[in-house]
Image (cartoon, coloured by chain):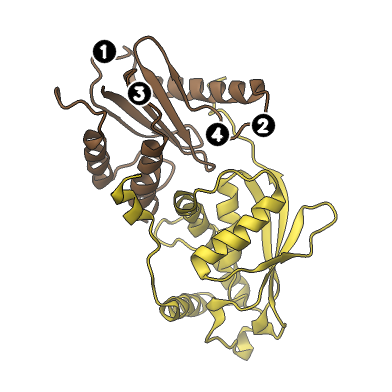
Chain colours: A yellow, B brown
């Protein structure tokens, strides 16, 4: 690999406080723009059809390419391997934390990511009038978008959140189905 | 040694980018048609190769050659496909194709919020960087332009 490649794939250092505060600014702005918490949660997670407002899902769709370019991780063989890669490689690379993977369902299609500390909420306290806001919901959208690009449809949601008084932050991931490659229309 | 041309496809078969260097003879069909045929061929060869594999496949299909040229293929788990045609003297160039993906496509297109994904890449920067990278390759012949 050439020198230029190394420069491109090197991880760039950035202040985590700046990151946390920037994320806070994003959530605050969304809270101002939308009437209720439900809509904010949706915006954080969801598909926005504008290229200029890439949040959650849209971030995931692009982030996965960066992840693959930098990590050299190949295709996963099963959902357990995927879970490990998400926790040990992806979270480490982008948030500097390694959540633990637990609570597997017997069928092996659901698991939980337990975040001991969530860097997004370092300076955050939820005001009373935003009790149903899922502050870090962006993460769910990122996970969903990224995995969809590697042919896995998943559902991701917060089931515990330290902001709501729980001891840890827990993201529940559920495998829905494999997305098969299709030949483009009219080529069969 | 020389590089003939390069295709970049996404997972839906859209040709994101095409460029050519030393290509003396054209296919004689419209470019759109050529992309479709190329993608269809890759799609079939990929599934055929994985069906015939006696062991679990890792990287899958890498390259094929005819008496005149060699086609190199690189695919990411997200289904981005980089295809480069060269002459027969060129060895394995997986790292080159990976570089085109990771240092050019990801850096200049995916990370550029103004570049919509899933359609032809309009970025002039991407085109010119790709062109100069390919021209700088050791197996890119210095004669002809």
Residue at 54 percent across and 84 percent down: it is A122
Based on the displayed image, in which of its 4 quarters is residue B21 positioned? top left
Q: Pointers 1 and 4 in contact (CB under 8 A)? A: no
Residue at the spot of label 2 = B56
Neighbor class of circle 3 (other Cα within 10 Å; few <14, some 14-19, many 20+) is many
Work out whether disc 4 and disc 3 sit on a shared chain. yes
Mark 4 or 3: the one toward you: 4
Answer yes or no: is residue B114 visible.
no
Q: CA distance from mark 4 to mark 3?
A: 19 Å
Chain hosting mark 1: B
Please tell me whether mark 4 sits on a helix, a strand or a loop.
loop
Label 4 environment density (alpha carbons within 10 Å; few <14, some 14–19, many ≥20) = few
Which residue is at a point 50% across and 57% down the rendered structure image? A58
Q: Provide the residue designation for mark 3.
A: B85
Q: Earlier in the sequence, mark 2 or mark 1?
A: 1
Q: Nearer the viewer, mark 3 or mark 1?
A: 3
Q: CA distance from mark 3 to mark 1?
A: 13 Å
Where is mark 4, residue-wise? B59
Determine the image quadrant of residue A113.
bottom right
Tell me if B128 is positioned left or right of A61 in this view. left
Vertical comparison of B136 with B22: above or below = below
Q: Which numbered tag is attached to residue B25?
A: 1
Work out which quarter of the rendered image holds the C terminus of chain B and state it: top left
Residue B60 place in picture, x, y as percent = 56, 30
Q: Nearer the viewer, mark 2 or mark 1?
A: 2
Pinpoint residue A89: horizontal percent, then vertical percent.
Answer: 56, 59
Q: Residue at x 37, y 43 (%)?
A: B99
Question: In the displayed structure, does residue A63 sit left or right of residue A128?
Answer: left
């Amino acid at each position: 690999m050439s020198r230029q490649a190394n420069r491109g794939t090197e991880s760039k250092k950035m202040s985590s406080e700046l990151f946390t505060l920037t994320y806070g600014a994003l959530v605050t702005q969304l809270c101002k723009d939308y009437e209720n918490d439900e809509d904010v949660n949706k915006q954080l997670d969801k598909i926005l059809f504008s290229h200029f407002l890439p949040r959650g899902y849209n971030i995931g769709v692009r982030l996965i390419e960066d992840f693959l370019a930098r990590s050299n991780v190949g295709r996963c063989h099963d959902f357990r391997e995927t879970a490990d890669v998400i926790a040990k490689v992806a979270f480490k690379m982008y948030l500097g934390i390694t959540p633990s993977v637990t609570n597997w369902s017997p069928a092996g299609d659901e698991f939980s990511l337990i975040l001991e500390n969530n860097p997004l909420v370092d300076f955050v306290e939820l005001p009373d009038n935003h009790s149903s806001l899922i502050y870090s919901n962006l993460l769910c959208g990122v996970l969903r978008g990224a995995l969809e690009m590697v042919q896995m449809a998943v559902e991701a949601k917060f089931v515990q959140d330290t902001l709501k008084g729980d001891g840890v932050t827990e993201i529940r991931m559920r495998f829905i189905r494999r997305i098969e490659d299709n030949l483009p229309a009219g080529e069969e | 040694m020389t590089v003939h041309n390069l295709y970049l496809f996404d997972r839906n078969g859209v040709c994101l980018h095409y460029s050519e260097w030393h290509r003396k003879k054209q296919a004689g069909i419209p470019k759109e048609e050529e992309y479709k045929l190329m993608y269809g061929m890759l799609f079939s060869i990929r599934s055929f190769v994985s069906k015939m594999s006696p062991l679990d496949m890792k990287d899958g299909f890498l390259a094929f050659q005819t008496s005149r040229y060699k086609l190199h293929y690189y695919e990411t788990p997200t289904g981005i496909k980089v295809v480069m045609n060269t002459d027969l003297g060129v060895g394995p160039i997986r790292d080159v194709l990976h570089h085109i993906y990771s240092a050019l496509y990801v850096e200049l297109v995916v990370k550029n919020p103004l570049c919509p994904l899933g359609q032809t890449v309009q970025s002039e920067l991407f085109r010119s960087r790709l062109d100069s990278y390919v021209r700088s390759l050791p197996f890119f012949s210095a004669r002809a332009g």
